[in-house]
């Protein structure tokens, strides 16, 4: 009789545990329905005094209801304790190689070690530039030979589809890409029309012509302090437009084969200079455009084609002549060494480079939950049999 009662009690505990987990899963799924991938960052909660961990997600603006820390109480099942702690995400370096297989290669953002091809084989569409952004922080690549912009999945690199359709809004030879401030629309430089075109961040539909300058041959573009800056290959200059697309004049002039630029953590503008195998990176005042001086040069820097500041604050420079990525101190410009060696990952002629934080896969929380309830059942059994 006692054994029958004990078995029934154990079944009740098991059923109650499973129902609790099912309800928790439903609540979590409901909370996450409105979230998109770029809104989320990993956080973790720990069941103190045990080896179990309960993982959760936290929005950049809203914390899901289940994102709390929990510990075992002496008399109750669980009791709330401290707030959640952040989990770090992986920073990775993405390199566009338009001449060696038309690939995007992925390297470890801390060590420079080759990880894998991220996007392979653009055929003959001549990829020109890339940017992370949009609603899901995916990768977007302009196809200079195809008159379109393609979208790729952030986590897998899988092709999603044409985000900006071929010829949309008169787009013919897309080059530089940039998303507007505060999660805004996608802006695309078109070398054939001397325009910067605007497309909806939601579906890639044509919004309108944002900026135009007669004779301009736009390359890379970037927003900074609500202004749009454009490398003009025809004028060997950086042109500036305000937030409404109104032309503000030449920001930097007399450039020498400028391929890329980037605004640094100090607010200044850094521009690549290709000078007959004596490449360098020059620095300009980010407010006035005044020349400050050469920031990085020598140490094998020959034909710099891509720039990016890393998560460590250092400046990383792609060199198409040496098929490598070089690292320079982000404050002084002092040479730090070769970050990606020549030919690593079959790197041929690196062009555009980007650092991007990639969220780690979120561990399932049902197993830890079931383990926790299993522990409860074991403790209950111990008390009964003891």
Image: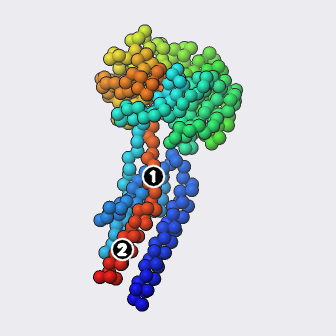
Question: Residue 318: x percent and y percent?
Answer: 42, 23
User: Which one is nearer the viewer's eye here, 26 or 116?
Assistant: 116
Q: Tell me the quarter of the image containing the N terminus.
A: bottom left
Question: Residue 254: x percent and y percent?
Answer: 47, 13
Residue 291 in sight here:
no
Residue 270 found in image quarter: top left
Residue located farthest toward the bottom when viewing the structure as drawn: 1
Q: Which residue is depicted at the point 31% across and 24% down?
A: 337
Question: Residue 34: x percent and y percent?
Answer: 57, 54
Q: In this image, 157 relative to 4: left or right?
A: right
User: Which one is nearer the viewer's eye here, 219 or 299?
Assistant: 299
Q: Which residue is depicted at the point 57% across and 31% down?
A: 141
Tell me the number on the disc at residue 27.
none
Q: In this image, 149 relative to 103: left or right?
A: right
Q: Are marks 2 and 1 in contact (CB under 8 Å)?
A: no
Q: How is the image coloured?
A: rainbow
Residue 306 found in image quarter: top left
**Element type at mark 2:** helix
Neighbor class of circle 2 (other Cα within 10 Å; few <14, some 14-19, many 20+) is few
**Element type at mark 1:** loop
Neighbor class of circle 1 (other Cα within 10 Å; few <14, some 14-19, many 20+) is few
Q: Name above or below for residue 71 compared with residue 34.
A: below
Question: Mark 1 sits on what residue?
Answer: 362
Q: Name above or below for residue 293 compared with residue 15.
A: above
Q: Which residue is depicted at the point 61% across and 31% down?
A: 149
Callout in the foreground (2, 1): 2
Tell me the number on the disc at residue 378.
2
- Earlier sequence position, callout 2 versus callout 1: 1
| Alpha carbon distance from label 2 to label 1 | 28 Å
Question: Residue 17: x percent and y percent?
Answer: 46, 72
Q: In this image, 202 relative to 110: left or right?
A: right
């Amino acid at each position: 009789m006692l054994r029958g009662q004990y078995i029934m009690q154990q079944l009740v505990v098991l059923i109650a545990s499973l129902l609790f987990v099912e309800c928790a899963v439903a609540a979590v799924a409901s909370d996450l329905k409105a979230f998109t991938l770029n809104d989320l960052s990993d956080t973790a909660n720990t069941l103190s005094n045990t080896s179990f961990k309960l993982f959760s997600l936290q929005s950049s603006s809203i914390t899901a209801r289940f994102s709390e820390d929990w510990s075992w109480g002496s008399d109750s099942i669980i009791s709330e304790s401290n707030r959640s702690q952040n989990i770090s995400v992986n920073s990775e370096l993405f390199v566009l190689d338009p001449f060696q297989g038309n690939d995007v290669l992925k390297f470890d953002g801390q060590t420079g070690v080759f990880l894998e091809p991220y996007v392979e084989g653009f055929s003959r569409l001549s990829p020109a530039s890339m940017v992370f952004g949009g609603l899901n922080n995916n990768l977007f690549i302009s196809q200079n030979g195809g008159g379109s912009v393609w979208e790729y999945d952030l986590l897998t690199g899988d092709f999603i589809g044409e985000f900006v359709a071929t010829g949309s809004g008169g787009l013919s030879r897309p080059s530089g890409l940039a998303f507007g401030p505060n999660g805004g629309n996608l802006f695309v430089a078109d070398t054939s029309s001397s325009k910067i075109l605007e497309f909806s961040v939601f579906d890639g539909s044509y919004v309108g012509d944002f900026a135009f300058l007669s004779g301009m041959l736009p390359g890379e573009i970037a927003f900074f302090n609500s202004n749009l800056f454009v490398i003009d290959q025809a004028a060997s200059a950086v042109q500036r437009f305000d937030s409404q697309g109104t032309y503000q004049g030449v920001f930097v002039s007399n450039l020498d084969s400028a391929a890329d630029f980037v605004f640094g953590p100090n607010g200044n503008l850094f521009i690549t200079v290709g000078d007959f195998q004596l490449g360098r990176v020059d620095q300009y005042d980010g407010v006035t455009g005044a020349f400050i001086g050469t920031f990085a040069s020598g140490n094998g820097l020959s034909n710099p084609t891509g720039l990016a500041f890393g998560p460590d604050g250092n400046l990383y420079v792609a060199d198409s002549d040496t098929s490598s990525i070089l690292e320079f101190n982000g404050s002084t410009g002092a040479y730090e060494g070769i970050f990606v060696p020549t030919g690593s990952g079959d790197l041929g002629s690196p062009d555009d480079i980007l650092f991007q934080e990639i969220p780690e896969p979120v561990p399932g929380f049902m197993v830890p939950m079931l383990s926790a309830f299993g522990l409860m059942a074991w403790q209950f059994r111990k008390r009964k049999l003891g």
